[in-house]
Amino acid sequence: MFKTKKSFHLLFFLIWAIVFLGPYLRNMQYADPLSVNRMVGEWIFLFILLLVFLINLYVLVPKYLFKDKRLRYLIMLSITIFAGIILDVILHQLVRPVEITNTIDRSYDFNNNAPFEQFSLVGTVFNNLIISLLIIGSSTAFELFYKWLSEERLRKDIEKEQLKTSLALLRHQVSPHFFMNTLNNIHTLIEISSARAQDGVERLSTLMRYLLYDSAQNSVDLKKEIEFIESFISLMQLRHSDEVEVKVNFPEVIPSVKIPPMLFISLLENAFKHGVNYPQKSYIHLIMMVDESFLCFNIKNSKHKIAAKSYGEFSGIGLENIKDSLYLLYKENYKLDIFNRENEFEVNLKIPL
């Protein structure tokens, strides 16, 4: 479609240039005064149509129609059309060819076929009115169409900015939440093993680089997001060690697709936060599958009685954020299933690529 109003109107002038060329091409094979007068008469009519077209396009529509002054627009439009018709009739009378005899040898009778010889005031006015209305209608329709396109483009730009702002706010909520949980884990590691705590700090620095640079983008490579998830899981395992069975299954061949950053971190955080209970055997199982059109992310974790109340509803900062983010990103084009079983909590997410 047209990117600017300048290119949009340039098309109109190109069309008009072709239209103005028509009378010349139609009469160029004849060099007699009658053909010249006919061509001049057609150009006069086209010039008046163009004048009415421009007045409507650049004056009447913006000044009256776009400002909801419809009655004034119709009045001014009617005055413009009839003024143009009157001007056309006057100018046609001035350039009406005189009777020419013995100077033109044609294969037809001008007294029966030449429009200027059969000049009809009523017919001319009626024809000019119909043509003027068609021209006015086309110019108004195109201007309204362009206005609609501009408003749609503006609306989409506003929605896009609102989406970016909303997602940024949600991610800013996730980042401190994630950072706080990770620091708590490292604090625990310091008491257990300083070497493991040092390893945890190094892994945390890797995660923070992702949070600071990649998560600010609208989308990231799936490979980077998987690396971020693996680093996060490794950091969590430093604290939990063998107390938690963690099984992860990512695609063997990672396709070159992009997804929104940090889309799954809230699900992982909740799995480690609510699915681990030291006195009892705990597990977290994660599976990611990717095809040409969709990405499926499944995570399940053990559920213990001490944490059962946490799964009463899909709540908490992380889980609420992911629901809001999914809606902002995909509207209704995603599927989120939550299974709250007696001894297990499972989330299955399917998003389009």
Image: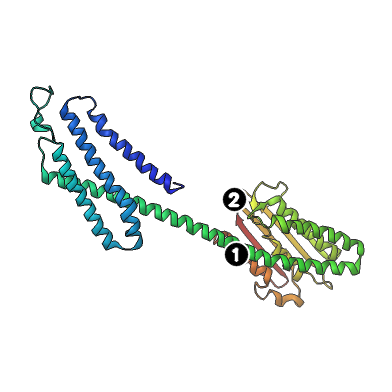
| Residue depicted at x 24% and y 44% | 48
Q: Percent position (x, y) of residue 286?
A: 73, 59
What residue is disc 2 on? Answer: 293
- The earlier-in-sequence mark between 2 and 1 is 1
Q: Is residue 188 above or below residue 73?
A: below
Q: Amino acid at mark 2?
A: Ser
Q: Amino acid at mark 1?
A: Ser
Q: Is residue 121 above or below residue 144?
A: above
Is label 1 in a helix, a strand or a loop? Answer: helix
Q: Percent position (x, y) of residue 333?
A: 55, 59
Which numbered tag is attached to residue 166?
A: 1
Marks counted in the figure total 2
Q: Locate residue 299: give its quadrant.
A: bottom right
Q: Is residue 14 above or below residue 337?
A: above
Gap in angstroms between the C-alphas marked 2 and 1: 26 Å
> Is residue 157 among what the camera can see?
yes
